[in-house]
Image (tube, rainbow, N blue to C red):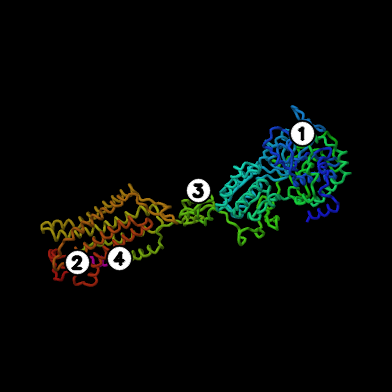
Amino acid sequence: MAGLMLLSLMALLGLGAGAPLCLSRQLRMQGDYVLGGLFPLGTAEDTGLSDRTQPNATVCTRFSSLGLLWALAMKMAVEEVNNRSTLLPGLRLGYDLFDTCSEPVVAMKPSLMFMAKAGSCDIAAYCNYTQYQPRVLAVIGPHSSELALITGKFFSFFLMPQVSYGASTDRLSNRETFPSFFRTVSSDRVQAVAMVELLQELGWNWVAAVGSDDEYGRQGLSLFSSLANARGICIAHEGLVPLPHTSSLRLGTVQGLLHQVNQSSVQVVVLFSSTRAARTLFSYSIHCRLSPKVWVASEAWLTSDLVMTLPGMAEVGTVLGFLQQGAPIPEFPSYVQTCLALAADPAFCASLDAEQPGLEEHVVGPRCPQCDHVTLEAMSAGLLHHQTFAAYAAVYGVAQALHNTLLCNASGCPPRDPVRPWQLLENMYNLTFRVRGLALQFDARGNVNMDYDLKLWVWRDLKPELRTVGAFNGRLKVWHSQMSWHTPGNQRPVSQCSRQCGEGQVRRVKGFHSCCYDCVDCKAGTYQRSPDDLLCTQCDQNQWSPDRSTRCFPRRLTFLAWGQPAVLVLLILLALALGLVLVALGLFIRHRDSPLVQASGGPRACFGLACLGLVCLSVLLFPGQPGPASCLAQQPLLHLPLTGCLSTLFLQAAQIFVGSELPSSWADQLRRCLQGPWAWLLVLLALLAEAALCAWYLVAFPPEVVTDWWVLPTQVLVHCRVRSWISFGLVHAINAMLAFLCFLGTFLVQSRPGRYNGARGLTFAMLAYFITWISFVPLFANVHVAYQPTVQMAAILLCALGILATFHLPKCYLLLQQLELNNPEFFLGDDARGQGSSGSGGKET
């Protein structure tokens, strides 16, 4: 709308397109302090610069309307400062604007002119340039990073302040190399950070990165690549696009790069390129029918008509990019119109010639011959270009620094010697100034940190319009509802080499790119610490985790607790065994003078039963949290009572063997040794031998309390550890030997008719002992360590119940149910007759 309005106003003024103007003569104005300007008013791409053999003049053939508009923005800013009373009151700024043709060989000539002495075209050679006064106080421009790297070093030698409105390469932030360089645009580093944030926000980690083969593209691509790699974004393909008019061999690399991108799963291409290289790339991509992609654009080509108007651009896919914000300049279109109108006025042009004769025309040639044939229609498209504000703000930055240097106030500037460039430079560091209500500041590196808008190309007829879909001010905001995509159903494209891993999975990288991976589950005991982990992290010793876990859980102590079901069953079994032992012991004590009890050993039988009760009670040492005392007491308090019980049974087996298998002459003598005090001495010796073995076991290989972190997946097992299985077996040796001798002495004994068969009960009792403990050995060795105490408790109780059930309980039955058999002849036989007792015959039991 603004362009159409200006065109109509131009028509009303009667400015014909073919009428010559004097606009080029408006690019210079005298003042108390003059600012130099470098603008791309034309291009020299068709002049064959690569074939130059002499340092002669270069003619710029192609006109750039944007360069002229940026020059007019600087001109407008200078005139505004001159008309204001708050900034540099009483002083007048001038300007001297030249064309760079976007070529270093062209830009150096006006740069030399700026450093010439005031009023001449000569640069004097001095040892000390402190008092040197060049023609200009500061330089605005140039636009491109390629030129700024050259002019920046040149002006930095003289400490001439230079403020660029477009050079964004991060190399210019180096204060050692470019101490006098400033800019009113952000560094490319900010734009690269914003691009990486955008890729992460939209979930794209598999991209292609392309840059133009110039300083801007190479440096921007390098910045983006380093930042992307640091954020876990993989660059599948990377390459440079040569500038136009380069060799066909280098242009062939573009086709190869596009072919790789087209054949891969990459759906996003980051293009950090200058305008001309971007046009070259898209020309080839359209020609090669590259499948539509998402193009993340750098600021240099995002708004370029040269790219937007390329035939077929609507088919390349979705274009996104960041555009620097700035304050609006609504008066600028009308100012451009006024400049063009004045340039068509002969009287005004004549006054310019009289006021400021061109001293340097014979040196640099015409400033901008194409500017004198420009039309408003040709310039209307760039009137609202975003970098117009950057050129406009650059003037205000220099003006504010000069205002501070001269110590100006509202009433004026105090008189002093003319300010030299290096004096102005001192006040530009960390300078804060306001432009159109927007507060700007040069940081320590000469950069202005400005916010960005995220722009999306939305096609309307033959040219896209820019829709704001987000913002970046150090943090990215994306308005997803405003986004539109080239994909069917307007679905956001997916650009990932591998699917996202689930929780509790880590990446096992395939090939060279960290974004191409297999998802591997974290096993129990490990966890996924962060989504980007490549290895599972081991839990701490006091923690556990299940499969595919993202955290660890604290382990809890576990041991054979009293409340466990197995322990409760064993306690019931213990109660049964103790009850039976007490019943048997009570019956034996009550009938202690009966032949049955006397035949069973009398007091020794009661002692054996009491020891059997103690064997049962020893199982109470196994449940509960193990301690040093309980671990040491378990085996002695089991085996000593068991030895006492088995020694009494051995004595009875020996008596039966002697009475049944040996001649009577031997039997009487041996029988006396197996009764009375001698029998108790044998029991005592057996107990002492077992006690010695237990003492040796406790001293040499004492059991220890162990906290085992690894045997159980989720708990910490506390248990008593046997340090030596050989010593553990030797503790059983005396009891096993007593049981074996007892079994051997009764197994082959033939009972006499009419007599009680005591050997049979002993045989079965020893069989119960051996079956229990022989079964215990493999079971105990192979069962999980957490269940070993339970197995040992069960073995103790089964052994006690076996002895009780096969030897003592049948006698209790006779005492309770068959009292007629409880006589001396049936139980004592020849012993009873020898004592003068009489017995009645009976059947064998």
Image quadrant holding the N terminus, namely bottom right
- Distance from Cα at disc 4 to Cα at disc 3: 77 Å
The residue type indicated by label 3 comes to Gly
Residue at the disc numbered 1? 115
The residue type indicated by label 2 comes to Pro
x 53%, y 48%: residue: 513
What element does badge 3 sit on?
Answer: loop
- Distance from Cα at disc 2 to Cα at disc 1: 138 Å
x 33%, y 65%: residue: 573
Determine whether label 3 and label 1 are within 8 Å by CB. Answer: no
Marked residue nearer the N-terminal end (3 or 1): 1
Q: Is 501 placed left or right of 698 in the picture?
A: right
Marked residue nearer the N-terminal end (2 or 1): 1
Answer few, some or many: residues within 10 Å of disc 1's Cα (few below 14, many 20 plus, some between 14 and 19). many
- Distance from Cα at disc 3 to Cα at disc 1: 56 Å
- Distance from Cα at disc 2 to Cα at disc 4: 20 Å
What element does badge 1 sit on?
Answer: loop
- x%, y% of residue 257? 58, 47
Q: Which of the numbered marks, if any, corresponds to residue 582?
A: 4
Marked residue nearer the N-terminal end (4 or 3): 3
Residue at the disc numbered 2? 595
Determine whether label 4 and label 3 are within 8 Å by CB. Answer: no
Determine whether label 2 and label 1 are within 8 Å by CB. Answer: no
What element does badge 4 sit on?
Answer: helix
Answer few, some or many: residues within 10 Å of disc 2's Cα (few below 14, many 20 plus, some between 14 and 19). many
Front in this rendered view, residue 794 or 237 = 237
Residue at the disc numbered 3? 511
Image quadrant holding the C terminus, namely bottom left
Exactly how many numbered labels are in the figure?
A: 4
Q: Which residues are magenta?
A: 583-594
Q: Nearer the viewer, mark 2 or mark 4?
A: 4
